[in-house]
Amino acid sequence: MTDIGFIRDIIIILIISIPIVFFFSRIRIPSIVGFLIAGMLIGPSGLRLITDIEVIEMLATFGVVLLLFTIGLELSIQRLFQIGKVLLITGSIQVILTLLIFMGLLHIAGLPITQSLFIGMLGAGSSTAVVLKYLSDNKEVDSQHGRLATGITLFQDLAGVPMMLLIPVLAATGDDVTSGYVIQTILISFGSVVLIYLTARYLMPKIVYYLAAARIREGFIIGIMLLLFGTAYLTNLAGVSLALGAFITGIILSESEFNRQVFADAIPLRDIFNSLFFISIGLLLNLDFVFDNAGLFSVIVLGIIVIKSIIIIIPLLAFKYPFRTGLVTGLLLGQIGEFSFVIALVGLDYGIIDPELYNAFLAASIFSLVLVPILAYFLPLIIDKFSTSFRDTVKDYTGPINTAIRHHVIIIGYGLNGQNLSRVLRETGIPYIIIDMDPDTVSELRNKKELVIFGDVTRPEILEQASITTAQCIVFAMSDIRASKLGLILAKKSNPDIFTVVRLRELDDVDEFVKLGADEIIPEEFETSLQIFSKVLETYHIPLNIIMKQIAIVRNEAYQLLRKEGTPEREFSRLNEILAAGITETYFVVDNNPHTGETINELDIRAKTGATIIAIVRNGKAIPNPSPNERISGNDTLVLVGDHRSVDVAIDYLNGELQVKEKG
């Protein structure tokens, strides 16, 4: 009988995976952390539910390929050129310094230079999944530190390509290894990858186009998987890892117009096999080894977080970003990423590191991934503790402001909303001051002679610089929800009478901002919903004053009407009455209208549609109750009356879009 013991192992993994996904989602920690911990618990050194991991490792190989493929899909060469000078320089400094510092410390500790360099490479990357999970859960993806963190992880992922190319070189040992051999190996690896990339870049878009043009979903998915695993296999034949081939495929297809569909089709497979991949990594961890060296690992994990954070903070401060932004960005990137797990597995296969060293790396990486979200959760306390030490630094970058300014508007954040508001205020002659934390934006505004302050709105002295006590209104137009909350509290404390406007992306924080004293809250999601239902009501010819009344009801009740289920219907009860009652609508007759020249009697609109023409406006003069012999002329405005359906049918009939059958 066929041995199907591996099915039992997969069932155990899937049973463990389901509660992990739900639990870690509830506590806002990325599920990959849970998968790693689950692997540790059910593995050979834990509960021993799974002891034979060969099959699991084989399935996890698919997970590696799909993981790197989707990472490549989410990147693009175009985005790399868009991330800006600051991110390129900061990313380069972070990767190079982290590599060199870790390599130096490990070599001093007694490791060979090859292993030290390899582990330095592993330490240079950060987890994109952990960063994005934290930012999305806290609604900070578009915040300043959110954009910086995601941009730097983008650079780190791309830096993984040359690192993987170096693995065959680092694996070379013995007396036969010469500088010529090293150069030859690098050139062969690099040349093979470049050849595969250029060939794939030329062929793949054409193949994907024909797959899409066939309009057979199964064929499209199978074709994409063939391209993915085929490219991965070719890179493996060239002496480079499967993972790098998958990454190259992802990057190429990210530039395709079909990349979103490819991503959507790959996601389910990626999620399944990724759980196997990360659990298989946890299975390899020797818990006895970790417990025996718990003190040492604690120091290593804290060292990783501190060193990586400082390496990020220093260049950001040099670029004149506030300390708060640098600290949040640094902490978010102070862990080891999923790309590093892939490189570590390849290095283990090549024999660059032994199982014991792999276990040490694995333990430090897993605990850094667990610890960073926890630190991020308590981030406000950390920031408050350290911020007072850097007030002078922030003050150095605030510009001279006219302290006599009064009854002005303070604009927090100079994104699209801040730009539009400042333009309107400038044209209407209302004084305003801008506060922003982007050094380039502040410099550009100063060149335009704008009143602008560089600084963090969560600092009382920044609001003092903006003359908060004499301001009439403050508008929080930034994407950082946490900073908006702290800034709102400080603004109300300094000037209880100031009118506060807060822009939000989503609905969840509305109640909290109401409790904090915000006078006007504008959630973009709700404003979009208001626009949608107003447009829908317009199509039913609901009078404008009724539409505006419904919008006012929603806004005045702090959006409770749309946010809660079981809302009383009394607010909208008038709509049914309006829909049932007759309405009045106007129709403008263009010169080439098919009914131009016809009399009202010939038009016979009442018999054919149910609507009635009660007046004609011609040359600015009204003709009430027009006679049946009155002819329709170009540029006339017809006044129609009837119920909603009759008026709609009449308009279609007048447009010549509806052929109404004669009665009789």
Image: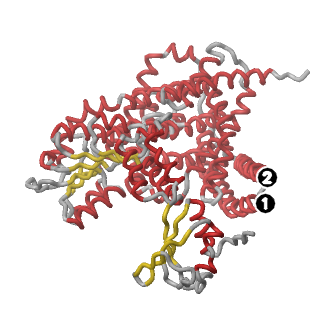
- Quarter of the image for residue 560 reads top left
| Up-down relation of residue 423 to residue 346 (above or below) | below
Contact flag, marks 2 and 1 (Cβ < 8 Å): yes
> Residue placed farthest to the left in the image?
404
Residue 217 placement (x, y as % from top left) = 76, 52
Residue 532 placement (x, y as % from top left) = 49, 54
| Up-down relation of residue 206 to residue 16 (above or below) | below
What residue appears at the point 21 percent right and 56 percent down from the top-left corner? 452
- Quarter of the image for residue 98 reads top left
- Quarter of the image for residue 461 reads top left
What residue appears at the point 64 percent right and 35 percent down from the top-left corner? 274
The circle drawn on residue 176 is: none
Asked whether 116 or 505 is in front, the reply is 505
For the N terminus, the image quarter is: top right
Q: Which residue is mark 1?
A: 214
For the C terminus, the image quarter is: bottom right
Residue 91 placement (x, y as % from top left) = 43, 48
Residue 326 seen from this side = yes
Q: Which residue is mark 2?
A: 219
What residue appears at the point 20 percent right and 35 percent down from the top-left corner? 389
